[in-house]
Amino acid sequence: MVYKNWEKFGIKTSLLGFGCMRLPTKDDGKIDEELATKMLNYAYDNGVNYFDNAYMYLDFQDEKFVGNWLSTKPRDSFYVTSKMPVMMIKSLEDAKRIFEEQLSNLKVAYFDFYLIHALNKNTWDFTLKSGIFDYLLSLKKSGKIHHLGFSFHDEFDVFEKIINYYNWDFCQIQYNYVDQDIQAGNRGYELAKSKDIPMVIMEPVKGGSLSNLPSNIDKIFKDYNPNVSTSSWGYRWVASHDNVHVVLSGMSSFEQVKDNINTFNAFRPLDDEENRLVEEVRSELNKRVFNGCTGCRYCQPCPQGVKIPYVFRAINGYSKFGDKEAMVWDYESHITNVKEGPEGCVKCGLCEKRCPQHLSIREDLQKSLKIYQEVKASLK
């Protein structure tokens, strides 16, 4: 297993981190404890020492199950992580109760790494105003949190504001070779690196989308090396960035654990030719988009409040990968009422006058609505 030095803190974490949000479950929704234990043991025995959890993962089962498993291991042999779920908290008292519950769930006296979970503009504002941030600082001072960070899901300007607010010990972003310009993206990576803030990466294979490429595109990788998995290309692209200290994988099968161990036991950064192939794959995926929206936001603000870039981002993602659940999640995460979606368009045409790509936005919005509605109906 390859390890990364956190030189500021004098610790070493496995480059591969075990994300526990997708542990296998049975038909009744309960964790398949026998299989999940086998997976965790195999990862641990092969050198994985970073285990990522959250309060609500697996319908609130994650922390208790992983806590029971960790209690069988020496405390100095692993790093355990969890997160403050500000998106579901109403008050500082809620935060205090949940934190103590998390320590009990995971059967530890302190967290090696602790994050403010899934920050966006609204949840960050709430974290400050509610006193939760100051509370977490007090926990760090008392030793119940050793390293304080945040995970992030919003646009770069929000990331910039948060990361510049405090001298964070680390931060966690979504990052992969396709989504280099989405959320924090390349700019967020470079900003964190410039501030000497180590990074933990989630969604390195985009929730599995980069593990199951269209066959004609996957052929680019297979022709170069048929003996490695498609997933390994995504993990290696992320891990080749020198400020990445942990690459999380939300593993749900024993086969995934074995494949990831193979990738990180024999890890080497991508060379020039391999980087070229990744860019070729990225280019081919981008050719499959529904339209050429780049997310530049010149069409914003819409006088009616339609969130045009978010509509097109969800539909373009579906065009690339065909992942219905991911498309609906992305769409509904940003389009929270009908006025923000295509239904709110009054066809004034102002957006099209502003668009540098000269897109037929009004027409594409109606096509997008039809695609969304059909996909949504097919999932029922």
Image: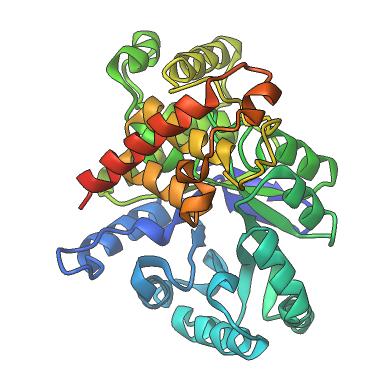
Please indicate, yes or no, whether residue 155 appears anywhere in the rendered image: yes
The quarter holding residue 238 reads top right
Residue 231 can be seen in this image: no
Q: Is residue 10 left or right of residue 73?
A: right
Q: Position of residue 336 (x, y in %)?
A: 49, 56
Residue at the image point whose x is 43% and y is 23% from the top: 290
Closer to us: 197 or 68: 197
Q: Nearer the viewer, residue 217 or 288?
A: 288
State the image coordinates of residue 90 (x, y, percent, origin top left): 59, 83
Residue 273 x/y as whole percent? 55, 9
Q: How many marks?
A: 0
Image side of residue 198 versus residue 14, left or right:
right
Splitting the image into 4 quarters, where does residue 272 fall? top right
The colour scheme used to paint the residues is rainbow
Q: Residue at x 53, y 65 (%)?
A: 77
Q: Is residue 101 left or right of residue 296?
A: left
Residue at the spot x=47%, y=32% of the render? 365
The answer to whether residue 348 is above or below residue 291 is below
Q: Residue furthest left?
A: 27
Q: Nearer the viewer, residue 340 or 84?
A: 340
Task: Say which of 161 and 83 sits in front.
Answer: 161
Task: Tell me: residue 151, above or below residue 267.
Answer: below
Q: Residue 184: percent from the left, percent from the top?
A: 67, 42
* Above-or-below relation of 225 to 244: above
User: Residue at (74%, 35%) from the top-left corner?
Assistant: 187
